[in-house]
Amino acid sequence: MGQPVRDYLLTLCVTTAVTYLLTGPVRKFAIAIGAMPAIRARDVHREPTPRLGGIAMFGGLCAGLITADHLFNLNSVFELSDEPRALLSGAALIWLIGVLDDKFELDALIKLGGQMIAAAVMVIQGLTILWLPIPGLGTVALTQWQGTLLTVALVVITINAVNFVDGLDGLAAGMVCIASAAFFLYTYRLWYGYGIEAAAPATLFAAILMGMCLGFLPHNMHPARIFMGDSGSMLIGLVLAAGAISVTGQVDPDAMKLFEGSERQATHAMLPVFIPLLLPLTIIAIPAADLILAIVRRTWNGQSPFAADRGHLHHRLLEIGHSHSRSVLIMYFWSALIAFGAVGYSVHSASLWIVLVIVGLSAVGLVLLLMPRFTPRAPHWAESFVPPRYRRRRREDAVGGAAEGEDAPHGQHGHTGSQMASPESERASVSVGVSGVNGATAVGPRSRFTDRDRADSPR
C-alpha cells in the first residue's frame, strides 16, 4: 500500500466542498420549515437564526465515505473492517434524532436514550473497545459487556461534551476540527509509521471529521448565518468518539515493537504513546471539563443535570468582558494547546523542550484571559489594512462623538458612555446584555442595546 496522503487530502477536500455547498440550501430549507426557535435567555445571539446545519454535515460525511471507498489506498479500510459502516449507521440514527430535536425540541431523556441506542448500533456492528492498555498490568482484555458499557459511556460523554460547548458562533465546529486534526496526526503515525492496520479507520474518520467542520465553519463564524443545532453537534461528537473507539483497545502494544521484554513492560514504557488513545478526553479536554462543571453546578443548585443555564466556560468569558470573537479564539487556543501538546508529548516524551513550550503557551493563554478589555491598535501607517475597530483615528472620533452626545438616553450611548456609567448601572447593563446581545458586542465595555433588543421583549 502506498502512502495515502493524497487520498486523505482528496477525501478531506470532497467532504469540505460538499458540506460547504449544502449548507446554503439547508439554511433556506430550515427557514422555510420554521426551524428558527425563539431566542432564549441563555442565548448570546440577538436575532433568530436557522438550525439544521447538521443536515449539510451529514451530507459531507456520506460524501467523504463514498469518496474514500473508491480510492485505491483507502478502499482496504472498507474491505477489511466493518467500522465505516458501523459509523454510518450510528451517525444516521443520531443525526435523525438531532434533526427532530432542532425542529420539535425533544426531551433531554429522549435524546440521551437515542445516543445510547446509536452507540449500541455501532457496537453490534463491531465498533467497540476490545481491550485496554493499563500501565503496570499490560493489555487487559474486556468482556463483551464491559466493552459495550465502556463504548456506550464514551460515546455519550463525548456527544454531550461537544453539545455543551456549542454556545457561540463557530465554537464547537472549530474546537472539534482542532481535536480531529491532532487525532489525525497521531493515528496516521500509528498506521503508516508503524504499519498498524487497526488505526486506518480512525485516521479516515478524523480526516472526514475535519472536512465536515471546515466546510461548515464559513457559514457558522460570527455573525453566524446558520447553526449546526443538535443534529450537527451530536453528529460530530459521535464521529469523534468513533475515531477514538476504533483505535483504542485495538492497537496491540507489541505490534509497535518499540520495547523489548514483557508486554507489561512495553505497555508501561509506552504510556505517553497511549495518552491520546485511552480516552478522547485529552483532545476534547475543554468540552469535557465544561460538561463536568455543568453537571456539578446544576446538581449543587438542585437542578437537573440537563437543565440549560448560562454557566458554561464561553459564557464566563463573555461575562468578564471578552468579545464574542475573542472568546472563541481563546477557546481555540486552549483546545489546540491541549490536543497538540498531548500528541507532541506522546511522540517525544523525553524531550524537556516540549514541556517548556506547553508551559510558556499556557502562560500566554492566562495573560489573554486576564486582559479582556485590551484592544490592540495598529500604527498610523497600517490603519488602511486593518478593521475599523483597530484604527486610532476612528477611535478618537468615536470618543469625541460620545462626549458631544452625553445627553442621549443610556441605551444609545457608545463605548465611552458605558464606561462613564456607575458600577451599579454597569452591572445592570451586563445582566440585560447577556441575554440580548449579538456576538461581537457580547458583554463588557461595548455598546448596549435598548429594551427592545432584549431576548424576552416583543418585536
Image (cartoon, rainbow, N blue to C red):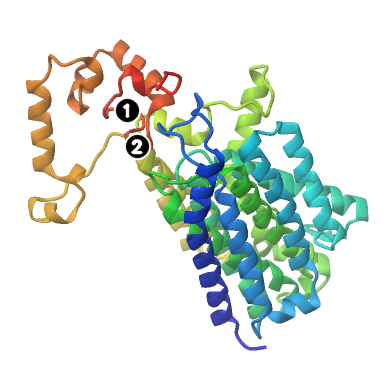
Residue at image point 26% right, 19% down: 411
Which numbered circle lies on residue 184?
none
Locate residue 146, reporting x and y percent.
88, 50
| Amino acid bearing label 1 | Gly
- Quarter of the figure that contains the N terminus: bottom right
Mark 2 packing: few (<14 Cα in 10 Å), some, or many (20+)? many
* Camera sees residue 345: no
User: At numbered mark 2, what does the secondary structure look like: helix, strand or loop?
Assistant: loop
Near-viewer residue (356 or 107):
107
Determine whether label 2 and label 1 are within 8 Å by CB.
yes
The image quarter containing residue 141 is: bottom right
Locate residue 367, reporting x and y percent.
35, 41
Residue at image point 40% right, 40% down: 327
User: At numbered mark 1, what does the secondary structure look like: helix, strand or loop?
Assistant: loop
| Amino acid bearing label 2 | Ser
- Left or right: residue 75 versus residue 150 is left
Name the residue tied to disc 2.
323
* Camera sees residue 423: yes
Locate residue 63, reporting x and y percent.
61, 68
The answer for how far apart the CA atoms under marks 2 and 1 are is: 8 Å
Mark 1 packing: few (<14 Cα in 10 Å), some, or many (20+)? many
- Left or right: residue 446 versus residue 131 is left
Residue at image point 42% right, 55% down: 218
Residue 344 lies, with reference to residue 157, above or below; the image says below
Q: Residue furthest front?
A: 32
Locate residue 286, reporting x and y percent.
55, 44
- Numbered marks: total: 2
Instruction: Give the mark, 2 or 1, whose residue is nearer the N terminus.
Output: 2
Residue at image point 60% right, 82% down: 4
Which numbered circle lies on residue 444?
1
